[in-house]
Amino acid sequence: MRYNRLYKDNHFLTPTTYTQQLSEYAENLKYEDIPAEVVERAKMILLQTVGVALASKGTPIYNKVIKMAREANGGEGGTTTVWGGGGKMAAINAALALGTTTDALDWEDCSWTGHPAAGVIPCAWLAAEERHKSGKDLITAIVAGYEVYQRIAMAVQPSDERWKKKGWGLTSWQIFGCILPIAKLYGFDARKINQAIGMGCECSTLPVAYHATTMSDFYHYEHGYRARDGFCIAKAVEKGIRNNRDALDEPRCYTGVICGDDGSNGSGETTIRSGEADLSWLTKDLGERYLIMRTLMKHWPANMWVQTPLEIIHDLVQEHGFGPDDVEEIIVDPPVKARMWAPDEGFTSVTHAQFSIPFVVASYLYDPHPGAHWYTPEKMKNPKTIALAKRVKPGPSPEESPMSCFKMFREETGFPMKHVTVRLKDGRVLEKSMDCHPGHPDNMMTREQFADRFRIQAAPALSAEEIEKALEVLCSIETVEDIASLSGLLG
């Protein structure tokens, strides 16, 4: 084992071995050592992520990224399959397509740090298909990807002040969720995994979130870019790269740059902090606590902070049977900052609409079956939908910021409580409160609920018979000897 030695002001600082420890964990993780409940969660995340990628078929984002990937591929042909009928491509190009489509409807997961499933799942599946790995190998790579990604991502979370000024650059650390499962399935030893992490540090994007200001759909493509980069990096390491190890231990490379200065304390010793980065997260409870179990799974194709108000509306509709024409007004309290917009002219992008509680609630009321059809260009500017969205109003409580809500989620101190009041034209007033909606780690969906959602998600791409076959296989993926044998399973 080589230990990194940091050098500053003519003094070697005390070395740390975070990168190597993560690398050794990933190399040594075995399927047999993973608890049964973690295996089950990994399978349900796989099921949901495949489903939401299939659900995006036919959307402008799906169509555009498939064209992009085929052009990069020089036409169709390769060893891996793009789910939903995208054809065969080389893994690196298929990753561009699947990384984008898994995030296109904002329907996959949400961890404390971003959307790891949009990187981990397509990269793990494609690497397993490319290298003829088993279902057990696939699950192990998914778990390794989540555990390493989440710790690196938590280590470099920005301070509240930086988040306010610069935004939340979640696609910066997304790259580690892409690299790790590929490295695991390529059979890298710890030395090569260490090199791959180092390359990820150097290829990471700037820690900003301009898409959150502009509401650009490029946000979804970014996840595809990171998945593609994961294969670029893994293949470069496989061919041979040297002298790029221990990057997480070097504050000038990533941890001290991504969200703050190098944080050196001048004492000749390395601290657990590097600027705003908390390096203790890199190996916190590694091998003892599975952070994949704290991943939130979205029940609806919308931003995370739209989930609970929409779930309440769904429950009230189920209980009282009202429709869009019955609604006088809907009050959401407390409102969420930058989630209550309903512009007169409609919405300019899928992202813009996905982040709007009023629009998503109105879309549900007109069509309670969730899917890409909520976000067609016509629906996002439909006068009836916009008029109903304008009747969804903020309550009297002060606005909650998404940042403060995320802080509660990350620190596991609870989850934002939402209260929804529905006033109907016949004079009835319906009310309900909820915090942890179905899919929150403290109210996780059952396998049956995941399966029901998959049936809805996969319908644009698969027949009813194909959906049931896919469910059967994905729910018992650990019995599959070669993922490549499933190339025709998902369209």
Image (cartoon, helix red, strand yellow):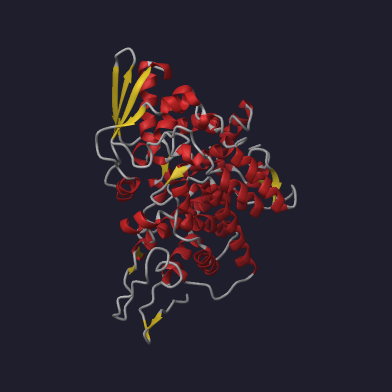
Q: Which residue sits at x=49%, y=65%?
A: 201
Of 138 and 479, the residue lying toward us: 138
* Residue farthest along the top direction in this orientation: 426
Q: Which residue sits at x=53%, y=45%?
A: 217
- Determine whether, in the image, residue 454 is placed left or right of residue 428: right
Of 186 and 4, the residue lying toward us: 4
* Residue farthest along the front direction in this orientation: 344
- Determine whether, in the image, residue 242 is placed left or right of residue 400: right
Which x, y percent locates residue 59? Answer: 60, 36
Residue 368 visible in rendering = no
Tell me the quarter of the picture where residue 479 sits. top right
Which x, y percent locates residue 350? Answer: 52, 39
Which x, y percent locates residue 384? Answer: 47, 23
Q: Which residue sits at x=59%, y=63%?
A: 233
- Determine whether, in the image, residue 407 is placed left or right of residue 372: left
Q: Is residue 428 above or below residue 179?
A: above
* Residue farthest along the left direction in this orientation: 397
Dividing the image into 4 quarters, which one contains the C terminus? top right
- Determine whether, in the image, residue 76 is placed left or right of residue 158: right
Q: Is residue 437 above or below residue 185?
A: above
Q: Is residue 373 above or below residue 178?
A: above
* Residue farthest along the bottom direction in this orientation: 10
Q: Which residue sits at x=46%, y=53%?
A: 210
Which x, y percent locates residue 446? Answer: 42, 33
Residue 181 visible in rendering = yes
**How many numbered markers are drawn?**
0
